[in-house]
Amino acid sequence: MAGVRSTAPRRAAFAALVTLLFLACVFFILSATTITTSAPGSPASHLAAVRRHAEDHAAVLAAYAAHARRLSSDSASQTESFLSTSSRLSALSSRLTLSTVALLEKEARGHVKRARALAAGAKEAFDTQSKILKLSDTVFAVGQQLLRARREGQLNSRIAAVSTPKSLHCLAMRLMESLLAANASTAAVDEPPPPPPELTDPSLYHYAIFSDNILAVSVVVASAARAASEPSRHVFHVVTAPMYLPAFRVWFARSPPPLGAHVQLVTVTDFPFINASSSPVLRQVEDGNRDVTLRELDYLRFYLPEMFPVLQRVVLLEDDVVVQRDLAELWRLDLGGKANAALHTCFGGFRRYGKYLNFSHPAVQGRFEPRACAWSYGVNVFDLLAWRRDQCTEQFNQLMEMNENGTVWDAASILPAGLMTFYGNTRPLDKSWHVMGLGYNPHIRPEDIRGAAVVHFNGNLKPWLDVAFNQYKQLWTKYVDTDMEFLTLCNFGL
């Protein structure tokens, strides 16, 4: 742990904090030196605005002080500075009264102006329609970037920049920078010890998560561990892209899974038998299939039995879920001989196979029923014994071969491949296990959310984005390790 926390990143963090402190103090000093005698129009509102502003800065500085206390002893002077400045700002707030506002007209006017600007920003941040419009603009802009990249033949080099929000990309880069800065002392992170026996113990509760989103994965792990009655029996297998593996290792070295839960971090390179000769996915990636390349990590889920040959049952969790109840019961659930259990999502004529598959294709006609009920990823229980028995991986490989040109289903979507692979082989999950829609539906019943074992932020309004619904966001943010200093440096609005 001490090896990863290098001196250089700590000094950089302190420099940033001290700079923010200095700017805040200069602002207050300059404001206090400009005093006139004319009374403002609304003294009470001016007073409230000034008091709130001072109290907010006092709270921020107190938080900085708490952060500094957690660092090494050489930060004592910064701690004392943060505390004293916070106390002075709190005292300033307590001295403000209606009788003194008249002497602070110019300062009050400035605060009112800033308050109005903050109110306008708050309206945009909290108004659902504004968020949706803002998201629409973002989606349009990203779409234009993708179109330009395709025309220029530069898609592969720009995938990370286009598809990864800036804060998430920043977090991964900061974590990897801290690893590089630690030099030789990071050997424990670069060369992890042999895997503990829990990782291959089929009597434990095993999860699989395929993601390159470090923050999202940490929330899934933390929420599931804290909801479990026996956290040390829960094992999380995180499969990520090779370029993000060092950053994942640094995160979980600094912030281990809580309550004794276990995490294994791997990439496709840890499974040499999954290669271009055995997997149509990797072959199509090598051949430049852009849609498959964008979803390569997601398609690896179809090789779960090969990745974990000794396991008998695995629960697949998406990285945009929060676990609210112990999931151990899923390992005792009777699947009736099926390979998969998932939440069925059809209603009326909606969310049926006809929406996802090209029924004019010969490979689809007569093999699938267009009105068959679709299901959703998010929480899936896979019986790997039944999977192997029914040769589901082989079926998936055949489907991928048939869809090499994208005529059977849209290869940018992972769900159709699952619907076809596990057709007639999926048991419905009770809806209380998996409540969906927190990423697009602002009207989910609170009692449904409270009773859900897992809530799923499927949709575009992800909880780590500014556009997330505020009524749901706290369900996710309460599991974020806010002690991780890189979150502040990367402008996460948590």
Image (cartoon, grey):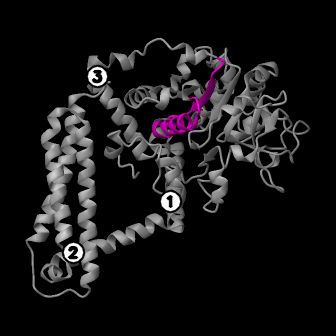
Residue 453's spot in the image, x, y percent? 65, 43
Q: The residue under label 1 is which amino acid type? A: Asn
Q: Which residues are magenta?
A: 202-230
Q: In the rendered structure, which amino acid carries the disc numbered 2?
A: Gly
271 relative to 23 in the view: left or right: right
| Residue beneath the point at 61% across and 38% down | 291
Percent position of residue 6, x then y: 24, 28
Query: Which quadrant, please, contains the N terminus?
Result: top left
- How far, Cα to Cα, is label 2 from label 1? 29 Å
Q: Look at mark 3 in the image and give the residue it sits on.
A: 3
* Residue in the foreground of this view, choosing between 228 and 175: 228
Secondary structure of residue under mark 2: helix
Name the N-terminal-most of marks 3 and 1: 3
Task: Report which residue position mark 2 lands on.
Answer: 110
Res. 44 visible in picture: yes
Q: Residue at x 18, y 59 (%)?
A: 24
- Few, some or many residues within 10 Å of mark 1 (<14, 14–19, 20+): some
Residue 243: image tag = none
Residue 54 is situated, as x and y percent measured from the top left of the image, at 23, 65
* Marks 2 and 1, the one that precedes in the sequence: 2
Picture layout, residue 4 above or below residue 345: above
Would you name the residue on which mark 1 appears? 470
Q: CA distance from mark 2 to mark 3?
A: 47 Å
* Location of residue 253 with respect to 470 vertically, above or below: above
Determine the image quadrant of residue 279.
top right
Magenta stretch: includes residue 207? yes
Mark 2 and mark 3 lie on one chain; the one further toward the N terminus is 3
For this view, does 262 lie left or right of residue 299?
left
Q: Position of residue 73 (x, y in %)?
A: 17, 33
Q: CA distance from mark 3 to mark 1?
A: 38 Å
Q: Is residue 280 left or right of residue 196?
A: right
Depth check, front residue: 41 or 365: 41
